[in-house]
Image: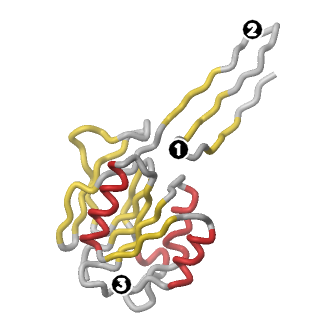
Amino acid sequence: MHASSHFYYPNLFYLLNHTVWSKESKRVTRLVCRQMTSPKILKMSWGSISLEKIGEDGKAVKGEEVVYRDAKVWPGGSCGWDWNKGGTSHWGGITREDVEDLKEKGAEVVVLTRGQWAFLHVPPEVVKELEALNFKVIVERTAPAMETYNKLVTEGHRVAGLFHTTC
């Protein structure tokens, strides 16, 4: 008899491979535990953000980085933030589509940036929707948001975010 499950635990991601004892196969239970790290922001300039590269094991790869124009980050990874995909614009702001996949990445805190000059709108309904799901939401200009994000990551929090590097 064999069963596999995924469990969420507040401070760690656990992947449980549970095998029930069977006389025929003589299998035992085993537990594999992975802690997923949010990538630290290494540097940011106008139109560019560099992050730690996260390996398949969910941890930072020493000495390696990834660079994006705008970034979407979460515990265990990152990608470029494509504004066209979610319909984002400066005046319309960050959309529900932009944050949808962040909800399922195991974060406890979501950092939403407004850009260097705070031209990117963050609609209150997007913030309220995340807060209703028990996320702590931080909305700041990009430079202070980067500092806040890195501080939270260093303290061991599971942080996701959207980082806009220009206006």
How many residues crowd around disc 1 within 10 Å: few (fewer than 14), some, or many (20 or more)?
some
Point out the frontmost of discs 1 and 3: 1
Residue at image location 59% in from the left, 64% down from the top: 134
How many residues crowd around disc 3 within 10 Å: few (fewer than 14), some, or many (20 or more)?
many
Residue at image location 30% in from the left, 39% down from the top: 61
Residue at image location 80% in from the left, 13% down from the top: 22
In this view, the residue in front, 140 or 126, is: 140
Query: Which circle marks residue 150 in the picture?
Result: none
Q: Name the residue under label 3.
A: 120
Task: Please state which amino acid type lies under the numbered disc 3.
Answer: Leu
Q: Name the residue under label 1.
A: 11
Real-space Cα distance between discs 1 and 2? 33 Å
Task: Please state which amino acid type lies under the numbered disc 2.
Answer: Lys
Check disc 3 and report its element: helix, strand or loop. loop
Check disc 1 and report its element: helix, strand or loop. loop
**How far across and how far down the image is residue 93, in percent?**
43, 85
In the rendered view, does 98 fall on the left or right side of 27? left
Note whether 45 is above or below 16 in the view shown: below
Task: Please state which amino acid type lies under the numbered disc 1.
Answer: Asn
**How far across and how far down the image is residue 95, in percent?**
50, 79
CB under 8 Å between callouts 1 and 2?
no
Point out the frontmost of discs 1 and 2: 1
Q: Which residue lies furthest to the left in this view?
A: 45
Q: Name the residue under label 2.
A: 26
**How far across and how far down the image is residue 63, in percent?**
21, 40
